[in-house]
Image (cartoon, grey):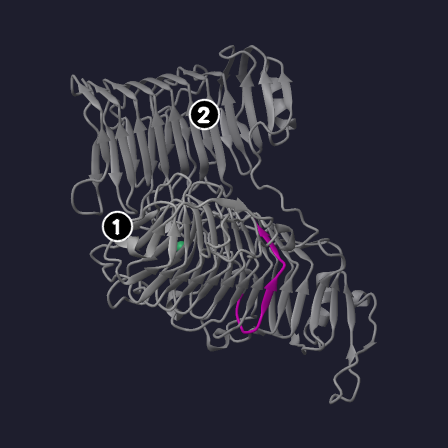
Amino acid sequence: MRLLSVYSVKIGLLLLSWFATEIAAEEYFIADKHAFKEIASDLEAGDKVILKNGIWTDFEILLKGQGTKEAPISLVAETKGQVILSGQSNLRLAGKYLVVSGLVFKDGYTPSSAVIEFRRNKSEMAFHSRVTEVVIDNYSNPDKQESDYWVALYGQHNRFDHNHLVGKRNKGVTVAVRLNNKDSQQNHHKIDHNYFGYRPTFGSNGGETLRIGTSHYSLTDSFTLVENNYFEQTNGEVEIISVKSGKNTLRGNVFYEAQGTLTMRHGNGNIIEENIFLGNGVAHTGGIRVINKDHVIRNNYLEGLTGYRFGSGFTVMNGVPNSAINRYHQVENATVENNTFINVQHIQLAAGSDAERSAVPIKSVMNNNLIFNENKKQPFTAFDDVSGIKFSGNIANSAVLPELAYGVKQEKISLKKQSNGLLVPTSESLNVGAKRDLKVLAKDDTGVSWYPKIPAVIPFDSGSTRAVDASSKALLAAISSAASGDILVLAPGQYDIPKLIKIDKVLTLRAKQQGKSKLTYERSALFEINDGGSLKLDGLTISGESSPDSAGNSVVRAQKWGMVENYRFVMTNSTLVDLDINHSYHFFVTGKGAFADEITFINNTFSKVTGDIVRLDSEIEDLGIYNAEYVTLKGNRFENVEGGVVKLYRGGTDESTFGPHLLMTDNTLSNVGLGKRNKSKSSLYLHGVQVTDIEKNVVTNSAPITVEHTVGEPKTAIVGNTFDKTDVPSIKELRVKGPHTALLKNNTVKNSGAK
Ligand code: CA
């Protein structure tokens, strides 16, 4: 075919002196998939393939050939950033000295197990090859539970650098180094200068950003260098990086407001140095977690980290005696020196100690570390005998645990901020903590310059304000033309909505005068949140009076199935009435597998509801796939609700997630949960919730609160509530023996038992 190559030029390459002849390197300008196929099977050293600018759909690229160090085979974009691979596209490399650059993967997802794979198949790997300046943006399988990698490194001596990866929403590690064949071990890969942008909370295990190895090959050395990468809000799960092999170096990386930790999950002899963790006090920001032997952790700087337990700023785990390869090996010969811990809330030693994990850390040292907490609260917790970690030369600004005091000197410390943004002791003679001239990697020095590193989440009320006349037509038109972040201000009056309103952007609907804008609707739900959507309602009155006369209506629901993007729902100062057309009329219903970052109710009134207020319990399989990270109820009134206020269910036994969290304060519940269809027989039903705070609520003539603890050492506090004609909360440990661990304090119980 004529379009095989629009032009091809011969370039004489000057080669090493021992190679006497010239070789002919071709340059192919490729305009379509067919043209690529024509040339792809006989690429030779020095050949260059240029992909024409534009959108390529369903393009599965195999770059294969034997390049040389001096004359690699390359595949480039005509213009960096203007070759878009969409639909079901992917890239495989096989052979040696291959280089790919300048491509963007977006608007689709890989049809295979990885977007970019350094192999053709099980027997043909890539060696000495490089992928650089490539973007993968939200190229997520639309079935969130369908697992894939974005990048899978196989072979040896490959480099993945200056790439931009953001918005992985489906299950599976973002970048995986595989060691599952001989040709992929002792690989000496280099992963550097990449920008790892926002990865939303996944809501179950499988949301790691980088994994090196697997437990099966964890006693094999990998020799992977992970250097100068920027991890910004990589929040997928408790492990941001999961090291599962030996002899890797992780150096000079920045973790910015990233929830989770760099975990040495399996494998020995890894070096973790000169990394910077900046949590800014964000919930669940963590640092480094140590398991196994011979690790060196030095010159790291950790500041403003709030995480606890396995997500702490620093954790040394207990192991399992004679551990199976996939459990916890004992910590031995760990060197932890010259690290700075500033406002790191938790340093946990012998963490995870229990009947199984009983092997305490041994032959380890913690030397010359700086520990500073502005609030003077010492950060250490010892869960077992920690005498196997010898402390010396450490300095802290507060008294630490008595058993560590011999090696942690308490001193008055003042700090100053250096030009690199890091805090160091004002006194130059105080020579502890990370080195003062630690290099702080700039975000702009990672990824590519031609693709913006923009915030991933559009906040509510960040757009423009638009007035809406009091008619359903005006409201529907305003919703359809609004941009994400906009605020629609509803004029006083009644809005009779004839159809389901699908929300696929970030929107606020606000009554111009609180309580004066009334919405009725004729479908089984008023709002449905779809991918890309988040909804905030403020000051509205919503009535179910015109709903269909059938069971199972709702006011708001998340897309019934197949939702892949996290969403937010907030309602404030609103009044809900007549949610009693037929039975099981719920206010809010999650879709199967849908995940909310936030569901918040403040100062609302609900009266006469025949179902539940919030149903976040779509999981029946107990795989630990739950529906919301933060559920907050503050200052609401719930009256005559036949179902429960919240049903929040997190099944399974996995410990990879932080949530769900439930915060419920200052609410009034009256005649809640006593309907005969309320199977849980509870006014509030929580199963497997990790953090629960129920404070200062007044519960009258209602079904009891039920809390079921499963795994993860959940934290539950029920404090200062009044239970009038209401049974006391029922708290059960379903997985752990012994009494329940909830804190119940200062609750008033009177006239016990609802009628
Ligand atoms: Ca994990």
Instruction: Residue 479: give x, y in percent of width and height.
Output: 60, 25
Q: Identify the image quadrant of residue 131.
A: bottom right
Residue type, numbered disc 2: Ser
- Residue 347: image location, x then y, percent: 36, 50
Q: Residues within 10 Å of mark 1 (few under 14, many from 20)?
A: few
Q: Which residues are magenta?
A: 153-166
Residue 264 appears in the picture as rendered: yes
Q: Please, is residue 610 above or below residue 265 in the view?
A: above
Question: In the figure, 203 relative to 147: above or below?
Answer: above
Residue 402 - label: 1
Name the mark on residue 517.
none
Q: Earlier in the sequence, mark 1 or mark 2?
A: 1
Looking at the image, residue 172 sits to the left or right of residue 98; the answer is: left
Q: Label 1 sits on what residue type?
A: Pro
Q: Position of residue 654 (x, y in %)?
A: 33, 51
Q: Which residue was labeled with disc 2? A: 524
Badges 1 and 2: C-beta atoms under 8 Å apart?
no
x then y, percent, for residue 357: 25, 59
Direction from residue 287 to residue 61 in the image, left or right: right
Residue 478 magenta-drawn? no
SS for dot 1? helix
Res. 119 image quadrant: bottom right
Q: How many marks?
A: 2
Q: Is residue 376 left or right of residue 724?
A: right
Q: Quadrant of the N terminus?
A: bottom right
Disc 2 secondary structure class: loop
Residue 238 in view here: no
